[in-house]
Image (cartoon, grey):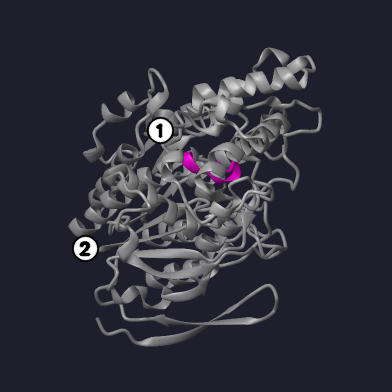
Amino acid sequence: MKITMAFVAFASYSNKIIISALPTSKSDQPLNYIFVVTDGMGPAYLNLARIMKAHVNNGDTVDDPYPNVKLAMDPYLVGQHQSRSYNSYITDSSAAATAFSTGQRINNGWLGVDPEGKNLGNIFGAAKNQKKAKIGCVAKSQITAATPASFYGHAKNRDNQFLIADQSLSFEVDVLLGGGLSQYRYTNRPESYTSSEYAVYPEADIIPNFIDLGYNIAYTKEDLLSLDASSGNRILGLFAEGNMLSAIDSKSKINNTEPDFVEMTRFGLESLKAMADKDGVTFMMTVEASLIDNAGHLNDATTAWQEILNYEKVWEYLTKFVDENPNTVLVATSDHETGGMTIGSRWGEDPDADNYSVVDPSQLMNQTVSFESIVLVAMEHEYKNNPPTDAEVLAYSNEIVAEYLKIDPTTLTEAEQEGLLEGFMPTSESDPFFNISVGLSGVVSRRARIGWTTTEHTATDINIYAYPPTHDVFDNIRGVIDNFDLGLWAANVFGLNLEEETLKVENIQNGPEYEI
């Protein structure tokens, strides 16, 4: 395809002019867009996933010739983006996803709202209003969480998820599949919100509103698979009160009723395509592999690699879909890196510190549940309201290590025991999720030689993948670009007027800066 170039100027909030060279030819232009966010996954995570894939498939050890194991997405790397927000070199998910959806950088903690407090038009809204496109969001997090919500919502506080749930209804997102049931129904929507000036809908339960609009409703895998994806009906699927289960927890949970990530993505995309075909229009869909980020915040290497290999199956399905629907393009990236993961690390005064370069993947094979699940168990322990002794804390933490990490407590080093004691000892100032997880990571990651620099986000440059990779339409996102360039690129490729959409959304309620 021959592409002619036009130089288009976009004004930024720093009063600089961003010049982007953008294609104007409409021949062979894609019609449909699938955008994937692998939340929190930096380049080191991908290396870890390759190592673990090799180990799982081949019993790979460092003494063997390194097997040529690749992830399904590896051949389709086209560039990287610089992950930052308007007010920080380190972005959060809402600011990053807003850059992807609007082509603008905003403040951390805000969602679809510029630094002056004005709502921003996004590519999904523009596609819906200007092209009559069908819109879908699939996520393993709550569907009202920062990343999926940035494609339909506007909030000065990303945690105002009752407001964001209302906005998903007002927007009439055609496919909504994920967690977050608690944001939609009467048992959780408080009167403090529904009676406030910020409530879009005063109802305590807004699921009947979706039913009135013709949505099918699903709460379980059985519900979802009983529906006909080819029917052309809209769907709201809420499979957990909060986030859905991580891959490692879904294997251990008895009577798990959630669809797996591939099933949910397949049903959502097939439903969206059927709706678009029925009305003779196009579609846009975002898919978020949400829980890689959760693992990074808790420095949980085992949960992270299993989540990535679970996502790899989704990528394989999506590329097959694009092959069968050549008028569709697929872009995947992460919003930021979480945890500052390194492959190879020296853990303080470790007696084996000289072996810091020897990564041992076998240490990441035996853990049976996520650190998050372990913390939830530990927080219900009988001593939570009774200050325990050091000996009691160590005895309990050793039980946890034996039961869930499958490590013999008698092999714990002094440094590992000290980390567990500090992590499991309850204090009024401590955050058990981070403290206990860091203590557990001090055993598992230490032994595997996986390092972590933080429990928060980092400013690491982030990989961008595109399919089909040789399509000329991707030429302007190759190399190292800014995160907001992905939003500007999408608007140009799909012929969307973001200024027009911004005017359309200017009066949408975006709430206060505090959590309602």
Q: Nearer the viewer, residue 167 or 188?
A: 188
Among the 4 quarters of the image, the one containing residue 376: top right
Q: Earlier in the sequence, mark 1 or mark 2?
A: 1
Magenta-tinted stretch: 295-303
In the rendered view, does 159 fall on the left or right side of 403?
right
Q: What kind of element bears circle 1?
A: strand
**What residue did someone put label 1 on?**
237
Q: Pick the quarter of the image with the N terminus.
A: bottom left
Q: Nearer the viewer, residue 37 or 458?
A: 458
* Residue annotated with mark 2: 326
Q: Give me the residue at 64% from left, 35% from top.
A: 416
Question: Is the residue 485 above or below the residue 328 in the image?
Answer: below
Q: Is residue 31 visible?
A: yes
Q: Amino acid at mark 2?
A: Pro
Q: x, y percentage for residue 406?
A: 47, 27
* Label 1 crowd (10 A; few <14 / some 14-19 / many >=20): many
- Give the distance between the C-alpha atoms of the residues marked 1 and 2, in whole angstroms: 28 Å
Let me know if residue 297 is in the magenta part.
yes
The image position of residue 387, as x and y in percent, is 80, 18
Residue 5 picture location, percent across and down: 39, 87
Q: Quadrant of the C terminus?
A: top right
Residue 423: mark: none
Residue located at (72% from left, 40% from top): 515
Question: What secondary structure prevails in the magenta region?
Answer: helix
Q: Secondary structure at mark 2?
A: loop
Tags 1 and 2 in contact by the CB under 8 Å rule?
Answer: no
Q: How many marks?
A: 2
Q: Which residue lies most toward the left here?
A: 324
